[in-house]
């Protein structure tokens, strides 16, 4: 037992104290790490909002800011009656970057998804709650409400704002 304790203490003392460790995704960060991350996201969001607003100013279509920090091409969009949890919705959407290049050839589709029980982009789930059957809407979404700092690990990189053309089927 003393040998194990001695080896443990020795190995701890030999660790370099200046080495910053990075916890795995979902791991625990220190308060200072969280503060740095929070400040980075705040600055990134402000920068993306400014760039998206400049992009909107050059478009023939009007976009309106929503309460959740994305834009929709329908005025008063997020002030409509909301769909409730456990209600079903079928939908599809296409993803574009701000050069209006389509990211995936095929639309992303879901059939009979139940609100409160499906995992989707925050902006998509929020927008679906306000949409009518058959309705289409274009969303301009900052990266924090899209795929965030990790991307989708396929074609969408980290910190990429998106244009989402969403349709309720």
Image (tube, grey):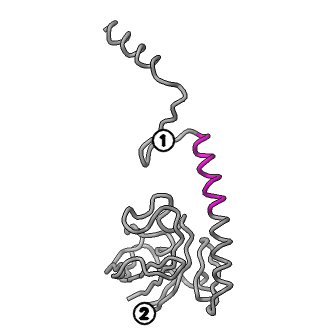
Image point (51%, 74%), residue name: 162
**N-terminal label among 2 and 1:** 1
Residue count near mark 1 (Cα–Cα under 10 Å), binned few <14, some 14–19, many ≥20: few
* Residue drawn where x is 63% and y is 64% of the image: 45
Query: Residue at position x 36%, y 65% from top?
Result: 154
Q: Nearer the viewer, mark 2 or mark 1?
A: 1
Residue 17's x, y, as percent? 53, 25
From which residue to which does the magenta span run?
A: 31-44
* Left-right relation of 53 to 157: right
* 2 to 136, vertically: above or below: above
Q: Position of residue 158 (x, y in %)?
A: 48, 61
Image quadrant in which the N terminus is located: top left
Is label 1 in a helix, a strand or a loop?
loop
Image coords of residue 133 (percent x, y): 43, 90
Task: Place residue 47 in its image quadrant.
Answer: bottom right
Q: Secondary structure at mark 2?
A: loop
The residue beneath circle 1 is 28
Check residue 82 for magenta coloring: no
Q: Viewed as shown, does residue 34 lie left or right of 113?
A: right
The secondary structure that dominates the magenta segment is helix
* Residue behind mark 2: 134
For the residues marked 2 and 1, what is the alpha-carbon distance in whole angstroms? 43 Å
Q: Nearer the viewer, residue 107 or 160?
A: 160
């Amino acid at each position: 037992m003393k040998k194990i304790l001695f080896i443990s203490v020795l190995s701890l003392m030999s660790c370099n104290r200046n080495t910053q460790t990075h916890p795995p995704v979902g791991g625990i960060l220190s308060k200072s790490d969280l503060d740095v991350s929070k400040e980075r996201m705040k600055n990134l969001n402000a920068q993306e909002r400014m760039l998206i607003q400049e992009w909107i100013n050059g478009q023939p279509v009007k976009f309106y800011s929503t309460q959740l920090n994305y834009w929709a091409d329908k005025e008063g969009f997020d002030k409509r009656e909301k769909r409730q949890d456990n209600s079903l919705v079928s939908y599809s959407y296409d993803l574009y970057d701000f050069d209006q290049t389509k990211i995936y050839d095929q639309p992303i589709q879901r059939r009979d998804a139940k609100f409160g029980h499906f995992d989707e982009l925050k902006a998509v789930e929020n927008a679906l709650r306000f949409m009518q059957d058959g309705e289409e809407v274009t969303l301009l979404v900052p990266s924090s409400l899209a795929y965030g700092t990790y991307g989708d690990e396929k074609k969408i990189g980290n910190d990429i704002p998106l244009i989402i053309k969403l349709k309720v089927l």
